[in-house]
Image (tube, helix red, strand yellow):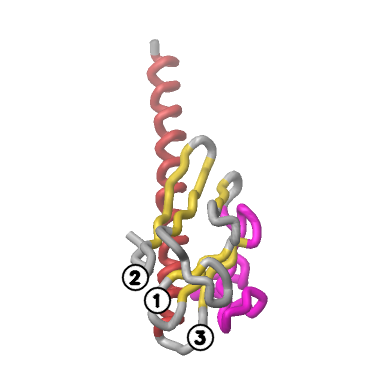
Amino acid sequence: MIIAIVSVAVASMVLSTTSYTLNSRVEVVKSHLRYAQTRAMNSNTVWGIYFSSGSAYSLFRNGNNNDRVTIPGEDSSTVTLPQGMSVADPASTGIVSFDSLGKPHTDAGAAMAQGQRSLSVSLGDKTQSITITPNTGYIP
C-alpha cells in the first residue's frame, strides 16, 4: 500500500514537472518573439527569430537570418531548448520576423504573413501552440 502511494506521488511530480517545463519554455519563446517585434518597431529594419532546427533558434536583424544577435539574458546567439523539446513551424519557413509596424512576416524579407501564424512547442507527449495574430503581431 505504501509503495503504491509513493509511486502515485512520484508519477504526479514527474508529470507536473514536464508540464511546468513546457509552460515555462513556451513563455520564454513568446518573450523572445516579443523582443524581436519590439526591436523591429523601434528601428527601421526587419528583426525576427530563426528556428534553425527543431531544438534551437536565434534572433536576427536587418532582414538577414545570418545576422544573428544574442538575446539579452542568453549566453550565445543560439538558444538551445531543453532535452526532448522541439518547436515546429507549420508554415515550414522556420522564420518569424516583424517589420517596423510590428506586423509578422513568414521570411526574413517582406513576405507578409497571411492568416494567423502558429508554432507548436512539444515536450514528450505534450504540445502547446504559440499564435501570432496577422496585421497586429499580437502574441497572447
Q: Which residues are magenta?
A: 52-81
Q: Seen in the image, is 88 located left or right of residue 21?
A: right
The crowding category of the residue bearing disc 1, from other C-alpha atoms within 10 Å (few below 14, some 14 to 19, many at least 20), is many
Residue 87: image location, x then y, percent: 55, 52
Q: Is there a contact, CB below 8 Å, between mark 2 and mark 3?
A: no
SS of the residue at dot 2? loop
Indicate the quadrant where residue 124 lies. Answer: top right
Identity of the residue drawn at 47% across and 89% down: 44
Picture quarter with the N terminus:
top left
Identify the residue under disc 1. Answer: 102
Residue 77's place in the image compared with 41, above or below, is above
Dot 3 or dot 1: first in sequence order is 3
**Near-viewer residue (70 or 91):** 91
Check disc 3 and give the amino acid type.
Thr
Instruction: Determine which residue is flagged by label 2.
Output: 136
Residue 120: % across, % down:
49, 49
**Residue under the image location 46 percent in, 34 percent down:** 14
Q: Earlier in the sequence, mark 2 or mark 1?
A: 1
| Closer to the camera in the image, 107 or 35 | 107
Labels 2 and 3: the sequence-earlier one:
3
Magenta stretch: includes residue 62: yes
Q: Amino acid at mark 1?
A: Gly
Numbered label attached to residue 45: 3
Q: How far apart, in angstroms, are the residues tagged by discs 2 and 3? A: 17 Å
Q: Residue at x 44, y 21 (%)?
A: 7
Q: From the viewer's perspective, is residue 52 above or below residue 23? A: below
Q: Residue 43 location, x and y as percent?
A: 45, 88
Q: CA distance from mark 3 to mark 1?
A: 11 Å
Say if mark 2 contacts mark 1, CB within 8 Å.
Answer: yes
Q: Which mark is residue 61?
A: none
